[in-house]
Amino acid sequence: MNPEAQNVWNDARQRAGAAYAEARRRVTIDPITRLEGHGRIEVFLDDAGEVERAYLQIPELRGFEVFSIGRPAEDMPQITSRICGVCPTAHHMAATKALDALYRVEPPPAARMIRELIYHAFMLEDHALHVYLLGGPDFIVGPAAPAAERNVAGVIGKVGVEVAKRVIAMRRRLRELIAYFGGKAIHPVFGLPGGVSKPLAPADLPGIRTLAADALAFAQFTDQVFHDLVLKNPEYVKLILSDPYTHRTAYMGLVDSANRVAFYDGMIRVVAANGREYAKFAASQYRDFVAEHVEPWSYVKFCYLKPLGWHGFTDRDDGGIYAVAPMARLNAADGMATPLAQRAYDEYFATLGGKPVHHTLANHWARVVEMLFAAERMVELAGAPGLTDPKVRTLPTATPTHGIGVVEAPRGTLFHDYETDPRGLITRANLIVATQNNAARIALSVEKAAKGLIHQGRVSEGLLNQVEMAFRAYDPCFGCATHALPGHLPLIVDIYGSGRRLLHHLVQE
Amino acid sequence: MILFAATDRCPSSLNVSPDPMSKVIVLGLGNDLLTDDAVGLRVAHEVRQRLVGDPRIEVKETAEMGLALLDLIVDRDSLIVVDSIQTGDQPPGHVHELEPEHFPEHAMRSPHALGVDKLCKLGRMRGLSAPTHVRLIAIEVQDPFTLGTEMTPEVQDAIDDAADLVVQRALEFAQLPAEEHAHGEAR
C-alpha cells in the first residue's frame, strides 16, 4: 500500500464530502429518488448565457485502486465487490477472471458453468429491478403521468400487485441461487483463481432446473408486459425515436465466437456509428483500444477509442466516443445465442429502424431482450452435462505478474486490471466501470438537454426531467459514490456563469 | 477484525423457494471499507449472535439500498434498520432511535436507509404487505468517508449499546400480534 497516495486521496475526498454536505444544507428537497446513487451535473455558460459545456461527475473509484495496493490479489474479488452496493456480483466476477489471468489458470468446465449460471441469474435479477422499478416510472407509468405517480407505487398500480409480487418473488429466488454458491455474506464469496469455492450437489440439480424454467417463464412474461404497456403505445415508440434522446456514437460489448451477445466471457467488439465492425479484441488488449480523456473542470475520466482519438463532445461517425450497456451490446453483436432472445432482437431492430439503434431510451427495451437471453442461458446451463462435476478448481502454480478480466455488467463492459509482485501483492490496479465507458455519451445527452433548454442564462421547465430520463436509460451506477456521502442522492445540476460563478442549483425531486 | 468472513455459511442445500418470512427483519446497512460507515453492519452482526435460534427475527447485513431493499422487507410485520448517521447534533457514538414520522429530517444523513420508510408506505398503498412497525436505529459517526477497515474508537464503543437497543426492539416487535396486512390501504 502507498499510504501517502491514500492520504492525499482521503484528504481530498473528505474535503469534497464536507463541502458537499455544506452545500446540501442550503437546499430543501424530498430526497427520494429512483436513481441508485447520485448524479451530479455541472453546466458552464458563456458570457451570453449560452451553454458552453455540461459535465457529469463520477468521483469515486480511484480511492479503491489506491486502497488495494499492497494487498493480496486474492482479496480483490472481496474488496472490489464493496465498491458498489448495486452490482457486487459483477465486480466479484470481473476480479475473479482477472485472477485467472494473473495466475494463468483455466477453471474446470463445471466451475465455468457455475460461474456463468450465477452470472446470468444476477443479470436477470438486476435487469428485472431496473425494468420494473427504476425505469418503470418512465415507460410503464409514462413520462406524462403526474409526478406523484412516477414512482414504485405508480408502477405497481399500473402492472397490478400480483405482478409486483411475482417480480419480488423471482428476485428473491434468483438471489437464493447466488447465496447457495456465494454464501449469505454481504457480498458474494465464490470466485477463486482457477474456479469456484463450491460444486453443485447432484441432489440440488432439480431445484436449479425448476428455478431456471421459472426464470424463463418470468422473462417471457416481462417481455409480454413490455409489449402490452409500452410498445402498444405509439407515443412511447415515438419518444424512443425522438431527437433529444438520439446520439450517433460507436458501441462496445462482449461477443461469443459467432459474434452473439455474451455476458460472462468473449471478445470485445466495437461497431462504429454506421454499424460496421470497427475493432474486435481480447480483454488483454484493452489498453490499445480504450483511453481516458481528462477535462479541467471535472474529475470524470471520459473513455474513448484510442485509435480514433478524442474529438471533443460531438456526435460524429468517425469519433472515439462509444457507449456500453444493453443497447450498445445489441448493436455490437450480430445476434443472440438463444432462440427467444433472437426473435426479440429481430423485432427490436425492425421496430426501431435497423442497426445500429442510436436512441438512448431503447436501453429499456434492450434490457428486456437481454432478460430473455439470461433466462434461456440459465435453462441451457441447468440442463448441461457435467454441471455437478465435483472438480471445480484448478490450483494456480504460476508466479503472478499481470492479469486482466472483463465481464458485461448489467450497465456495460467492466474491466479489472491488476499487476502484482511475485508474491501476488497488488502493485497497480486499474478498473474501468461501465459508467466510465458511458461517461462521454452521457455527457452528450446531458449537453443536448442543456443546450436545448437553457438560453440567455435562463433554464426552461423540463430540463431536469429530460436529463433524468436520459440518465436513467443508461442506468448509470453511482452506487460506488453514495456510500461516502450523506445521502441516497438525487440528480443535482449546478449551473455556472462566466467566472465560474454558481447561478443555479437545481435538484430533481 | 475479520474483514472478509462470511457472516453465514453457505446454505447446505439449495432452497430456491425460501421458507416463510420471519415476522421481524433487522437490516444492517453500510460499507465495511469506509471506516465508521461499517457500524450498521457490525451492530447487525452482534445482534445476530444474541438472537441465534429465534425464528421470528431475521438479521441481515446488506450493502444494498433504496428500491433494491424492497424484496427484503415485503411480507414482514416489522423492520428495524441499523445505519450510520451524521446529524452533527450529537457526539460520535450516540445512538439515535427514530420512528418513521421523524425519518424525513434525518434520513438524508443516514445514507443507506434513505427511502426505506417511503418504500414501505408506497408498497402498502398498492397492496403489498410491507412492515407496519418501522424503526431506524442510527449511530452517530465521525468518519464515514475515509477508506479504512477500523472504526473510530467512539463508534466502536457504541456497538454494544446499539445492539442492546436493537435486540430489545426486535423482541418487542416479535411479541406483537400478527398483523392484518392492509391490502389496498389508502395511505
Image (cartoon, rainbow, N blue to C red):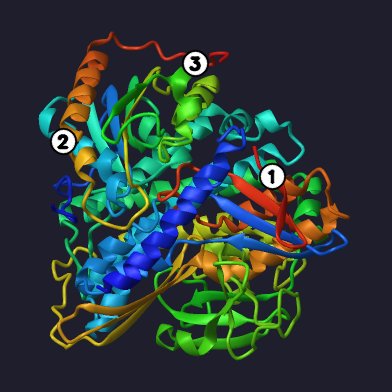
For this rendering, which residue is in front, A355 or A193? A193
Q: CA distance from mark 1 to mark 3?
A: 37 Å
Q: Nearer the viewer, residue A434 or A500?
A: A500
Distance from Cα at disc 2 to Cα at disc 1: 41 Å
Is A236 left or right of A227, judged from the image as shown?
Answer: right
Q: Nearer the viewer, mark 2 or mark 1?
A: 1
Q: Which residue is mark 2?
A: B46
> Crowding at label 1, few (<14), some or many (≥20) Cα neighbours within 10 Å?
some
Residue A280, horizontal then vertical, whole percent: 53, 87
- Read off the chain for label 3: B
Q: Secondary structure at mark 1?
A: strand
User: Viewer-proximal residue, A466 or A358?
Assistant: A466
Q: Position of residue A223 (x, y in %)?
A: 58, 49
Number of numbered labels in the structure image: 3
- Secondary element type, mark 2: helix
Location of mark 1 (residue):
A506
- Residue A338 appears in the figure: no
Identify the residue position indicated by label 3 in the image. B183
